Image (cartoon, helix red, strand yellow):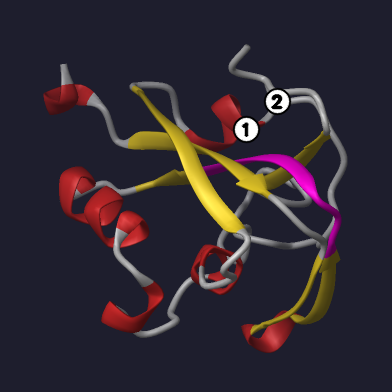
Amino acid sequence: MLANCTTYQLFIRLAHRADVTVGRRGQCRFPDGWYIYTGSARRGLRARLRRHCAPPTEKRLRWHIDYLLAQPQAEIRFIAVSEQPECALNRTVDGTMPCPGFGASDCRSACGSHLRFLGETDPLA
């Protein structure tokens, strides 16, 4: 199945609010609760997912999501993969955008953000 998948979604639980400087985006406030981050890796999906799951001490902060995942209160709880294009899949996610432009530096579909805050309700339940 992974052979045709280039898009992924990280279901992230943030146990406590975090104020994070996200690269050049600057300071963002992330309330505690659930998030879905939609990304893509045209080559090396498995390597990208392994990188996201690696402890922050083992990687350089490169992408916006790295800054959020470096917070001790952030935990990836589930990963979904898809054949859908990144922006199309991202548009299917409800929620708010706590940090406009997050993960969307190269987005040409006016998504606004590729990170959505879902609130306290567990989307996996």
Residues shaded magenta: 30-38
* Dot 2 alpha-carbon crowd within 10 angstroms: few under 14, some 14 to 19, many 20 or more: some
Residue at coordinates 68% horizontally, 88% vertically from top-left? 24
Q: CA distance from mark 1 to mark 2?
A: 6 Å
* Rendering coords of residue 78 (x, y %): 44, 31
Question: In this figure, which residue is indicated by the disc labeled 2?
Answer: 93
**Residue 10 to residue 52: above or below:** above
Q: Quadrant of the C terminus?
A: top right
* Rendering coords of residue 21 (x, y %): 72, 84
- Left or right, 119 with respect to 71, comes to right
Q: Amino acid at mark 1?
A: Asn
**Residue 28 to residue 8: above or below:** below
* Rendering coords of residue 116 (x, y %): 74, 41
Are discs 1 and 2 less than 8 Å apart at CB? yes
Please identify the quarter of the rendering in which residue 19 is found.
bottom right
Please identify the quarter of the rendering in which residue 57 is found.
bottom left
Residue 59 magenta? no
Please identify the quarter of the rendering in which residue 59 is found.
bottom left
Residue 90: mark in rendering = 1
Residue at coordinates 86% horizontally, 55% vertically from top-left? 31
Residue 30: mark in rendering = none
Residue at coordinates 70% horizontally, 23% vertically from top-left? 122
* Rendering coords of residue 45 (x, y %): 22, 45
Residue 31 magenta? yes
Q: Quadrant of the N terminus?
A: top left
Closer to the camera, 87 or 56? Answer: 56
Q: Main secondary structure of the magenta part?
A: strand
**Kind of element beneath mark 2:** loop
* Dot 1 alpha-carbon crowd within 10 angstroms: few under 14, some 14 to 19, many 20 or more: many
Q: Amino acid at mark 2?
A: Val
